[in-house]
Amino acid sequence: MRILVIGAGRVGASVVAALHAQHDVTVIDVDGEHLNTIGARYDVLTVVGNGTSRAAMQNASIASQDLVIAATDRDEINIVAALQARALCKGRILVRTSSAEYLSAWRAGELPVDVMISAENEIAQAVSRAIGMPGALQTDMFADGRAEMVEFEVHADAAENIVGRRIAELRVPDESVIASLIRADRVLIPGGNDVVEEGDRIVLIASPAASREWALRLARRDVEDIKEVVIVGGGTTGRTIARTLCGQGLRVRIIDADEAVARICAEEIAQADVFCADATDSGFLQRENVGRADAVICCTERDERDLLISLLAKSLGVRVAVAVVGDPDYVPIFERVGVDHALNQRLVVAEEIVRFTHDPRTRGFAMLENDRVEVLELEIRPTSEVIGRPFRDRPLEGAIVGAIVRGPQVIFPRGNDALQAGDSAIILAEAHRVQGLERTL
């Protein structure tokens, strides 16, 4: 596929990193230094110019592009670039936005683009998934919520110790499949004789009920549902998260030190309690019993402040700390020092964008392990060569089918099961194998 990415900032760079190996990618940006960095790292074409410029687009061979991704940090540039692209090429147009108004206009059919992705909505959904499954490193939904991909880290002091046990010895709920073991830099499609080691990350495809059962078994402490949440940072991202969680019936408190921002929060989100205060003030946190909250979500504009507040809240008794991290390189550092979930908005948006570069039959998509592993829900062609072949024969090299969506049924397959024409399969595979799988299936 020929893909034009407009914007070489962090979202654009993340999209290029995920796409360059499998697609013919061109990048436009006004910043030549950003383009030099991307061009030196990846095999892509670069064009210095404004993404709204007709001349720059023509220099990027706009007429032959199959997909145009407008991913700058400015909504207006993305919209204008998308409208220019619509006039100059027949490919699909995808736009990144942070504007609820633009998103509403697109949903109403008033903007002629194929896909519009809201950064704030995506991060709010990611936060919701993170706190909805305490103890999970990552969760993603498939099959309209009837199946989930869940990743846990394995520890000997969990409620059920599975360290040192063979996969064949584990009690696997009927509605779940062990899809992978991630060990250091290795991704294993596990067989019955593989042994689970301390620190492995186990990836499961399961029903929501089975996911919850696994969470209770693999948790290092008693897992309780999240009922009360404190959000630190009342900007656009914080307010979107707050609206999402209030809509799910959680009790939400918002803290922001800026009086004007706190006032906006109080006016827009009547269900939440809003405080104008400094969340680094331990005296305030103690007076307001923040330590009794089940989770704290930090989304201020400064990563170091989010880290401090996350750790301070945990020291006061908060069970789960989530930080929305601006720099993707900080994500593993945050998690290493005790933050339960570090989410980077740009990476979350990039993952959603990458989904649209896959085969049109792809209905769901998630990335793991710094984009090295992909989970996708893919409709099976009637001519696929794997139809009717039982899974015990391992018909898919380097991949595993974790679930089959067959009409109203979701089947979590065992060795005797096989794919049928018209099924959708939820598949885990290393990213470099996905294109081959799409051709096979």
Image (cartoon, grey):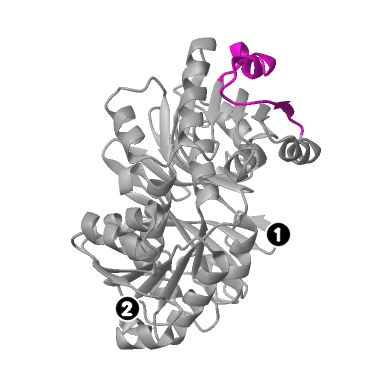
Task: Give whichever of discs 2 and 1 has the lower sequence position.
Answer: 1
Residue located at (66% from left, 14% from top): 61
- Characterize the local packing of mark 2: few (<14), some (14-19) or many (20 or more) Cα atoms within 10 angstroms: many
Image height of 256 relative to 368, above or below: below
Tell me which amino acid carries mark 2: Ala
Rendered-image quadrant of the N terminus: top right
Residue located at (59% from left, 30% from top): 6
Q: Position of residue 93 (x, y in %)?
A: 48, 23
Residue located at (55% from left, 81% from top): 156
Tag 1 residue: 185
Tag 2 residue: 293
User: Residue extending furthest front?
Assistant: 260
Do we see residue 167 in this rendering?
Answer: yes
Q: Is residue 104 magenta?
A: no
Q: Position of residue 173 (x, y in %)?
A: 38, 63
Which of the two marks, 2 or 1, is nearer to us in this view? 2
Tell me which amino acid carries mark 1: Asp
Question: Which span is picked out in magenta?
Answer: 43-66
Front position in the image: 116 or 361? 116
User: Residue extending furthest left?
Assistant: 270
